[in-house]
Image (cartoon, rainbow, N blue to C red):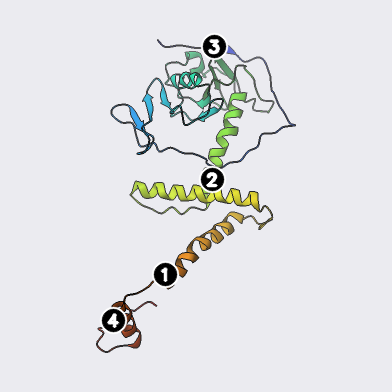
């Protein structure tokens, strides 16, 4: 049975702020899961070592395993995952959801989809006992739709654009993802490849180096202070610290007697050693 919202206009302005205890924003990536596509049985394995799966259906979206996330948290996701069923499933696990939602979802009332005669910067809310949906018109012909189980009031921000608080909270949380994509893309080890495991490896290296950069700033915030390219300097130092021990180890690789004799003959220019034009021995 499909549930629909009851739409009503947003008239009240309620903005809760707490300037004495601002939120601590540390934008690093703590945990990730690989989405490799939906299997025929509608399930997706977390990894080869986990028996727990992600359950997927058009009504419920993706539901994380119960042991991977703590209760009391808020999940922020884009319209690829957001659905009414997923929000209900997370509520059962005492978790809230805030995310953009696609306009073709059957749970959305038609009032939220009609923006032809809506005023600019206007917001329209729809409510159930546990869910809140909002439609915001930032410019002519554009409709921004979000679903939330965290917000229960038709609150608007006190800015000129009068964005709903649902959108501002979504942007504040999702901004961490966008910021991570930006800083990782600025200094990346990625190279063109057709092998997806290599692409995954490049991504893991990029994220790991940025996380280590954040930890390095926490330990030594005065290092290279005032320079706009601190991350690049850190990556150079990190690369040298990782490579130099391997270079030193290669210089002391033990050789067999036959290999040592061959190398000595090549170095001394033994006439019995065949030389080809364009080939050189690297020492």
Numbered disc in front, either 3 or 1: 1
Towards the viewer: 139 or 228: 228
- Find residue 232 and report its image quarter: bottom right
Labelled pair 2, 3 in contact (Cβ < 8 Å):
no
What residue is shown with label 4? 277
- Residue most extreme to the right: 20
What residue is shown with label 2? 182
Q: How many marks?
A: 4
Numbered disc in front, either 2 or 1: 1
- Residue 226 horizontal side relative to residue 269, left or right: right
Labelled pair 2, 4 in contact (Cβ < 8 Å):
no
Q: Mark on residue 178?
A: none
Q: Tell me if mark 4 has few (under 14), some (14-19) or many (20+) residues whose alpha carbon lies within 10 angstroms of its own.
A: few
Residue 278 visible in image: no
What residue is shown with label 1? 250
- Residue 18 horizontal side relative to residue 133, left or right: right
* Residues at marks 2 and 1, CA–CA distance in whole angstroms: 36 Å
Q: Tell me if mark 1 has few (under 14), some (14-19) or many (20+) residues whose alpha carbon lies within 10 angstroms of its own.
A: few
Q: Mark on residue 129?
A: 3
Labelled pair 3, 1 in contact (Cβ < 8 Å):
no
């Amino acid at each position: 049975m499909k549930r629909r919202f009851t739409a009503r206009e947003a008239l009240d302005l309620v903005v809760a702020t707490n300037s004495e205890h601002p939120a601590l924003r540390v934008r690093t990536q703590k945990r990730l899961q690989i989405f490799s596509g939906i299997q025929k049985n509608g399930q997706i394995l977390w990894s080869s070592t986990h028996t727990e799966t992600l359950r997927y259906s058009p009504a419920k979206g993706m539901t994380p395993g119960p042991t991977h996330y703590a209760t009391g948290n808020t999940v922020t996701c884009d319209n690829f995952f957001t659905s009414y069923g997923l929000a209900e499933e997370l509520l059962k696990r005492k978790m809230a959801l805030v995310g953009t939602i696609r306009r073709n979802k059957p749970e959305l009332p038609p009032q939220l989809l009609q923006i032809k005669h809506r005023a600019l910067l206007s917001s329209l809310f729809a409510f159930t006992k546990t869910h809140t949906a909002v439609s915001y018109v930032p410019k002519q012909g554009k409709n921004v739709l979000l679903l939330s189980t965290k917000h229960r009031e038709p609150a608007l921000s006190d800015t000129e654009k009068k964005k709903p608080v649902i959108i501002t909270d979504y942007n504040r949380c999702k901004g961490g993802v966008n910021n991570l994509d930006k800083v990782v893309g600025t200094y990346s080890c990625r190279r063109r490849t057709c092998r997806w495991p290599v692409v995954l490896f490049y991504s893991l290296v990029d994220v790991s180096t940025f996380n280590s950069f954040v930890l390095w700033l926490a330990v030594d915030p005065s290092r290279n202070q005032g320079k706009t390219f601190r991350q690049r300097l850190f990556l150079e130092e990190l690369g040298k610290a990782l490579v130099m021990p391997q270079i030193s180890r290669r210089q002391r690789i033990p050789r067999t007697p036959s290999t040592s004799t061959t190398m000595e003959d090549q170095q001394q220019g033994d006439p019995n050693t065949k030389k080809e034009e364009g080939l050189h021995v690297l020492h």
